[in-house]
Image (tube, grey):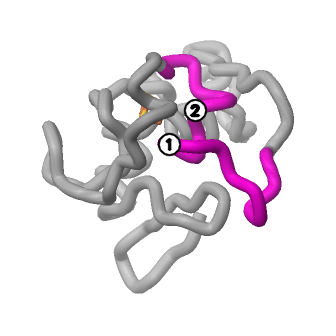
Amino acid sequence: VRHASDRVAVMYLGRIVEAGTEDEIYEHPTHPYTQALLSAAPSPDPALRDNSERILLEGDVPSPADPPSGCRFRTRCFKARDVCAEEDPELRIRSASHPDACLFSEERQVVRPV
Ligand code: SF4
C-alpha cells in the first residue's frame, strides 16, 4: 500500500489494483486483494478485531517476471472465474467512486465499525 498525499494506492505484482482516498480504501474497498489485505491487518482495538471478517488467501505470490495470464491476482483470488484467466482488467472506475482493476469488483466492508 502506497500513500501519496491523501490518496492511497494498493499494488499487486507491480501494478496498482485499487486507488482512492483513505476512506474509500479502508471503509469501502472494492478489489478482492485490498479486501484480503485489510482483513489480515492487525487492529490495536480488540472490539474491531473481534468484529472483523478475515479473508485468507491461498497459494504463493507468483513471480512478477512470469505473471499469470489475464488478471495477475487470479491464482489467489477468492472471486476468480474462468474469464479472469483471459482478460487483464485495467484500472478504471466501475461501481464505486474510486478506480480498481477487477472484472467483478464490489464493495465489501471487511473492518466493521463497532
Ligand atoms: S478480475 Fe477476477 S481474478 Fe482478478 S481480482 Fe477480479 S475477480 Fe479476482
- Quarter residue 58 falls in: top right
The amino acid at mark 2 is: Arg
- Disc 2 residue lies near ligand 1 with CB under 8 A: yes
In the image, ligand 1 is in what quadrant? top left
- Disc 1 residue lies near ligand 1 with CB under 8 A: yes
Q: Which residue is mark 1?
A: 71
Q: Do the residues bearing badges 1 and 2 touch, measured as CB atoms within 8 Å?
A: yes
Left or right, 20 with reference to 59: left
- Residue 52 seen in this snapshot: no
Q: Residue at x 66, y 34 (%)?
A: 45
Q: Residue at x 70, y 40 (%)?
A: 41
Q: Position of residue 109 (x, y in %)?
A: 39, 26
| 45 or 74: nearer the viewer | 74
Q: Position of residue 89 (x, y in %)?
A: 35, 48
Q: Which residue is mark 2?
A: 74
Say above or below: 16 vs 76: below
Left or right, 43 with reference to 1: right
| 103 or 26: nearer the viewer | 103
Instruction: Label 1, secondary structure: give it.
Output: loop
- Does residue 63 show up magenta in the picture? yes
For the residues marked 1 and 2, what is the alpha-carbon distance in whole angstroms? 5 Å
- Provide the major secondary structure of the magenta segment: loop
- Does residue 75 show up magenta in the picture? yes
The amino acid at mark 1 is: Cys
Q: Residue at x 82, y 27 (%)?
A: 59
Instruction: Label 2, secondary structure: give it.
Output: loop
State the quadrant of the N terminus.
bottom right
Q: How many marks?
A: 2
Left or right, 42 with reference to 74: right
- Looking at this view, name the residue that lies furthest to the right: 60
Q: Position of residue 76 (x, y in %)?
A: 67, 29
Q: Which residues are magenta?
A: 62-80
